[in-house]
Image (spheres, grey):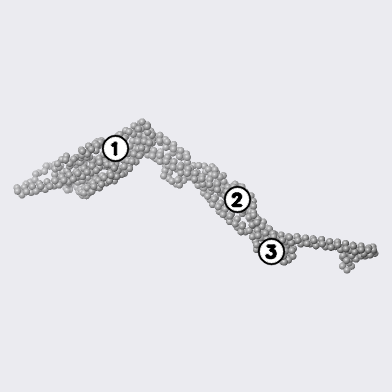
Amino acid sequence: MAITGTKNPLLGETTCGSLLQQLQLIWDEVGESDEERDKMLLQLEQECLDVYKRKVDQASKSRVLLLQALADSRVELARFLSVLGENSFIDIPDKSSGTIKEQLATIAPALEQLRKQKEERIKEFADVLSQIHKIRGEITGTLKIGEQKGTSAVDEEDLSLKKLDEYHSQLQELQKEKSDRLHKVLDFVSTVHDLCAVLGMDFFSTITEVHPSLNDSVGVQSKSISNDTLSKLSKMVMALEEDKKMRLQKLQELAARLTDLWNLMDTLTEERSLFNHVTCNISATVDEVMVPGALALDLIEQAEVEVERLDELKASKMKEIALKKRTELEDIYARAHIEIDSAAAREKIMSLIDSENVEPSELLADMDNQILKAKEEALCRKEILEKIEKWMSACEEESWLEDYNRDENRYNASRGAHLNLKRAEKARILVNKIPALVDTLTAKTRAWEEDRGTSFVYDGVPLLAMLDEYTMLRQDREEEKRRLRDQKRFHEQLNTEQEALFGSKPSPARPLGPKKVVGPRGNAGASNGTPSRRLSLSTHHSSSNGVRSASRDGKREANRPSAPVNYVAIAKEDATPAVPGSYPAPASP
């Protein structure tokens, strides 16, 4: 049987049917049995079925892969949206919105966009975290200057804008803290610079001991702001301020000693001016000393050397200084009218200096203490001494007024008569105040003695005894005046009776002689026989209180206020009988 063509004449192509027809023709030509034919057809059908199965399996596998890819894409898309916090970014297509490939085609661009956005977000997170870790490292001191912090690990499970904003907020807080710390560091550095300038210290070597980055050659942003740096700077500032305080205190002590030594030895102004830079800060506070080098060590050493030199010079002039202080002490006692044994004290000082058994500084300190105590004692006597001066001045005016009243020519039109008249008017007012003044002085003196438990002595004489004697003498004088007035009235009455009996008779002629004219004077005692305003007691007072020295220092004698001119040193029973128009004459001590 001949084999015909295998192409379908209608379709022009080979099909399964045409091939089966060819196979039938071949079998007919060959003469295959029906059993063989059925067997071969069954085999052929099985083989076709296997091919279809393989194709179905392949298609099924491809479908499963596409579904898995779609599911993975959906999961990845959801994860991107969750990580980026963009839940409303895109709508995920559901299963009924199209074929699998259509759904994949819809998701693919969104995934690509989210992948890029994630990469950009990771870079942003890495940059912010890197800055945060860098600033934290600078604050804690774990990051050295110039060292770059490695790439910070980013948590890719949360890349949302909210988280990024949180990191940005942390970064801003850290940047603010860094700025504050930098300002503190710069303030500390400026303070250290000023302190080093005042103390005469090298600023660069001092500040680099804290941290090398604090040098001026390093940029501001590169300076260390760590806790350790701030702590060291704070301690350094405190140490320098304490050093400044101690140096100023030492310099002021040296300046005070220099001033005392200069005053003791009367140092010339030109020599003192060499140390004006030392003495100019003698009363300054720590904050007021800002001049560079004002508290440098070499300046303090210079002052110490000068003090040592002056101390040595002072030791050589010890006697002169001691006598000068002794004179000052005696002047204080003289102004306070306190008697001391000056000769014995001076002899004792000279013997101490010659024996060299006492340190000059101790001797001067002891004399300074004596001067201080003397000033305190003079101060507590000041009020009473002022009232004594008023009392003595009033007594002087009283004595002058008595002389003025005895002058029969006081109303003559002589030169200066009007001045004496004015003075007499003032003197009468002042004399009338003497009793009240004496009472006040007595009361204050008694209060002073009760408060201190000792007697108030004026130039070696108890003041109350002086006041008592003055009061007695004043009473005696008033009685004498009354007696004289009564006697005068008796004589006038007797003369009147005689004239009535025998007629008037001329008064005896007065002996001619120079007329006494009372003029202005500073010391009334000089014209009425009183040599000075010195006070004295009667003989029994002198014997009980000790004999006062007859010889006194001329300077003390000139400065010491004298006693009332009418305060006499005689007892009542020894007083000379007074004649009309005269009073008891005051005596010199």
Mark 1 and mark 3 in contact? Answer it, CB < 8 Å. Answer: no
Q: Earlier along the polypeptide chain: callout 1 or callout 2?
A: 2
Q: Is residue 2 among what the camera can see?
A: no
Q: Which mark is residue 134?
A: 2
Q: CA distance from mark 1 to mark 2?
A: 85 Å
Disc 1 crowd rating (10 Å Cα; few below 14, some 14-19, many 20+) is few
Determine the residue positioned at 74% across, 61% down. 67
Where is residue 555, by image quadrant? top left
Kindly identify which residue carries mark 3: 92
Going by the numbered disc 1, the residue's amino acid type is: Ile
Q: CA distance from mark 1 to mark 3?
A: 120 Å
Kindly identify which residue carries mark 1: 340
Q: Earlier along the polypeptide chain: callout 1 or callout 3?
A: 3
x, y percentage for residue 413? 17, 48
Determine the residue positioned at 23% across, 42% down. 465
Q: CA distance from mark 2 to mark 3?
A: 41 Å
Is 342 situated left or right of 399 in this image? right
Determine the residue positioned at 43% across, 43% down. 281
Disc 2 crowd rating (10 Å Cα; few below 14, some 14-19, many 20+) is many
Check disc 3 and report its element: helix, strand or loop: loop
Q: How many marks?
A: 3
